Amino acid sequence: TQSQQLADRAGQDGTLGHDSLLRQLRGVLRSAIGAAYGTDAPSHLADIGIEFDRSGGLTLDETALNAALSNTRDGVVALFTTAGGAGAFGALETAIHAYTQAGGFLSTAQTRLTDQMSRLDDHIADMQDRLAIRRAALQKEYTAADAIMTQLKAQSGGLSSVGSGGLLSNG
């Protein structure tokens, strides 16, 4: 819905922006992207124009990337892929793998949320059953009260006719 989209952009409670797992993943990715890889230039992704903007989005400065590729093409390649996978790509892959592997953080969170939804569904079903029982009891009470009112009206009518017919007299 439109209100949920506005809440998502504003980072209000109940949105993914407040999910601790996603905040943690964002922090891990931010650290991996900001880390130094090696001692030779370029050693940071920011050196080749890859960095975060103020809103947390990842940006690419094509001018900086093209300049780095022109000046130190081998350095740029080494930044991403060093021996043993210790470059930026290896670090990002390791960070993401911890979240996405079977039994990883996302899998565990998904299981937890699925279990929570199942418990809520059970709770809702129990509440609906209780409401149905309460409704049936109230309908039975209303029907009984209506029958008594009908009976009292009939008796009242009978007493009125007896009183107006002169059957009851004072004295």
Image (spheres, rainbow, N blue to C red):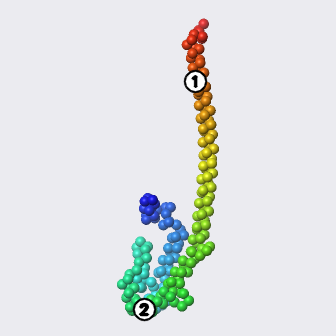
Residues at circles 2 and 1 in contact by the CB criterion of under 8 Å: no
Q: Residue at x 40, y 73 (%)?
A: 54
Q: How many marks?
A: 2
Q: CA distance from mark 2 to mark 1?
A: 100 Å
Give the residue number, with chain letter if any, for mark 1: 153
Q: Residue at x 40, y 80 (%)?
A: 60
Q: Is residue 95 above or below residue 14?
A: below
The amino acid beneath tag 2 is: Arg
Residue 88 is left or right of residue 59, and the answer is right
Helix, strand or loop at mark 1: helix
Q: Is residue 113 above or below residue 69?
A: above
Give the residue number, with chain letter if any, for mark 2: 73
Residue 34 is left or right of residue 153, and the answer is left
The amino acid beneath tag 1 is: Lys
Residue 105 in percent (x, y) is at: 58, 72
Residue 101 - label: none
* Residue 90 visible in the current orientation: yes
Q: Give whichever of discs 2 and 1 has the lower sequence position.
A: 2
119 or 12: nearer the eye? 119
Q: Is residue 26 above or below residue 113?
A: below
Residue 23 in percent (x, y) is at: 51, 70
Residue 94 in percent (x, y) is at: 55, 81
